[in-house]
Amino acid sequence: MPRLSTELWEQRRQHVLVSAWRCFTRDGFHATSMDDIIAATGMSSSAVYRYFRSKSELVDATAAESLQRIRDLLAGLLAQEPTPSLAEVVEALVDYVAKRNKNEDYDLSKIAVYAWAEALRRPEVRTRTHDFYAGVRVHLTQLAQRWRDDGRLAPDADPDAVGAVLLTMLPGLIVTQHLVDGASATQLVEGLAGLASVR
């Protein structure tokens, strides 16, 4: 297929996907119908179905996009030299969550919450989500290992435990952003430091 045609195909597929994000942001997965999405695209139903055969495919593609953005963020942090500090990692996570809801048309952070619910409902989505977050924990543990190696983390600290805390904090950032006033990166770092002194 000629390159231009391939690019056009990708552009139209992305248009359908973004149109679905707008609908999902407004009404959630289950209250959104394919007719709603088709109307939002301004395309014919046959054209939309060339790119996604069902709403389930759109839901899966939406979840995959959300996860890929987290993966890209962590890959970028791991690639930095020198290794970013805990404060820099937490700030990057907080900024990432904040930016996900800045688009006027859709909010991927809200959609992430719907995707977690979908993982509880559909075993195949749960498996993919579990595997993804297990990989995220590995990346966060690698960061903690580097902090221990360069003396920024206590020699007897468990990097895997640190990775588990950071992984658990990430969904919390998204939920609190929508339900209560979210914490700043400074507050979170100070809170983590304070907890380290609890006996």
Image (cartoon, helix red, strand yellow):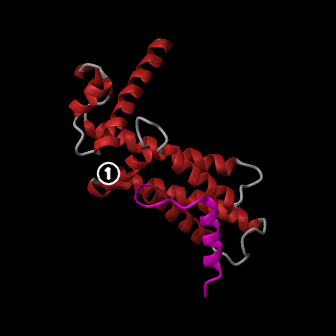
184 in the magenta segment:
yes
State the image coordinates of residue 49 (x, y, percent, origin top left).
Answer: 26, 25
**Residue 1 visible (yes or no):** no
Circle 1 crowding by C-alpha within 10 Å: few under 14, some 14–19, many from 20: few
Quarter holding the C terminus?
Answer: bottom right
Dot 1 falls on a residue whose secondary structure is: helix
Q: Where does residue 150 sit, x and y in percent of width and height? A: 78, 65
Q: Is residue 119 visible?
A: yes
In the image: residue 184, left or right of residue 12: right
Magenta range is: 178-199
Taking the image as shown, residue 28 lies to the left or right of residue 91, namely: left
Which residue is the site of mark 1? Answer: 124
Where residue 188 appears, as percent x and y from the top left, is: 59, 65
As rendered, which of 59 and 112 lies closer to the eye? 112
Q: Is residue 102 above or below residue 40?
A: below
The prevailing secondary structure element of the residues shown in magenta is helix
